[in-house]
Amino acid sequence: MRAVTVAGKDMLPVLENKDLPVAGLDEVVLQLHASAMNHRDVWITKGLYPGIRYGCTMGSDGCGTYLGQEYIINPGLGWGDSEQAQSSSFRVLGVPDEGTFADNIAIDRKYLHPKPDHLSVHQAAALPLAGVTAYRALLSRARATAGEKVLITGIGGGVALMAMQFALAQGCAVFVTSSDPDKIHKAKNMGASEGYNYKDPDWPKKLAADAGGVDVVIDGACGAGFSSLVKVCNPGGRIAFYGATAGPVDSLNPQAVFWKQLSILGSTMGSESDFALMVDFVAKHRVTPVIDEVVPLDNFESGFRRMAAGSQFGKIVFSH
């Protein structure tokens, strides 16, 4: 079978022929029809992720068929028994485990969930990792409710877009940030109330003028801009962050946090319960993941280059 594997640090992956996987105890072999990229895949090629195993098949997201039924895969393996946090054995599918950028995968059947009927295989493949990360941050951790105002930073990435779609489906008013005016325009066309260029030092004042502040912030960057997120929060606000692409938070005014009774919530992926609830939410509200482009698996290099450039709006999906 075809498989896209890790070649080496700072190298594009390679397409190899591998033997068909053999199902182990409690596993099935899923024939994959589509898979999707995450920033994690680019970080792996740069050597910036722990547990890298060269020659391993990459990919965390996938949709495929087993015994005539279409399934999506929960890529969060070994979460554990606590809903509060993942166990020490938790890991993400795809390096060091064999991943989804292949024609077939052996996977424990407990990680398979029936594909929501309204989604194509490409849309379904785009859902799992971004979907569960956004769901846990927005609904399990920040507990956003109808009528609240939600700020989503860095709109255009897979998690940010899913968080925006979930917030809109939940009945929230959504505001977004990006350095790309086109991405802000697209987000507003999807239902965002307003968008702001985070490189504009006055963007918090503009948001305050438009919205008066927000109740929930979903952030994947942290870094120097985190203090602005504290500024735009209403009293009792919640900031949930799932990544730190802009680096550590160096300057945070603790008085602003405790005086406004803010909650700062770290969030990573999601539990098996989060994943099941996310799939049900998507099916109920007929949420459709945004796809930037669908690329044949044989042309995977173009997907990696586009993801590395950061120009995508939505998920990059491989068609098998």
Image (cartoon, grey):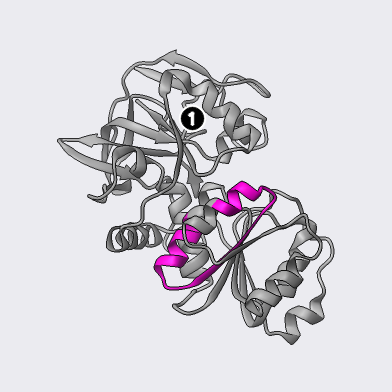
Judging depth in this view, the residue of 92 and 154 nearest the camera is 154
Judging depth in this view, the residue of 305 and 113 nearest the camera is 305
* Image quarter hosting the N terminus: top left
Residue sitting at x 49%, y 23%: 300
Question: Is 287 rendered above or below residue 119?
Answer: below
Q: Is residue 181 left or right of residue 294?
A: right
**Element class at badge 1:** loop
Question: Is 290 rendered above or below residue 216?
Answer: above
Coordinates of residue 96 in the picture (x, y in percent): 51, 33
Q: Is residue 282 left or right of residue 259?
A: left
* Image quarter hosting the C terminus: top left
The answer to whether residue 205 is magenta is: no
Question: Is 98 rendered above or below residue 16?
Answer: below
Residue sitting at x 40%, y 34%: 35
Q: Is residue 1 left or right of residue 174?
A: left
Coordinates of residue 121 in the picture (x, y in percent): 30, 38
Going by the numbered disc 1, the residue's amino acid type is: Met
Bounds of the magenta span? 162-185
Classify 10 Å Cα crowding around label 1: few (below 14), some (14-19), many (20 and above). many
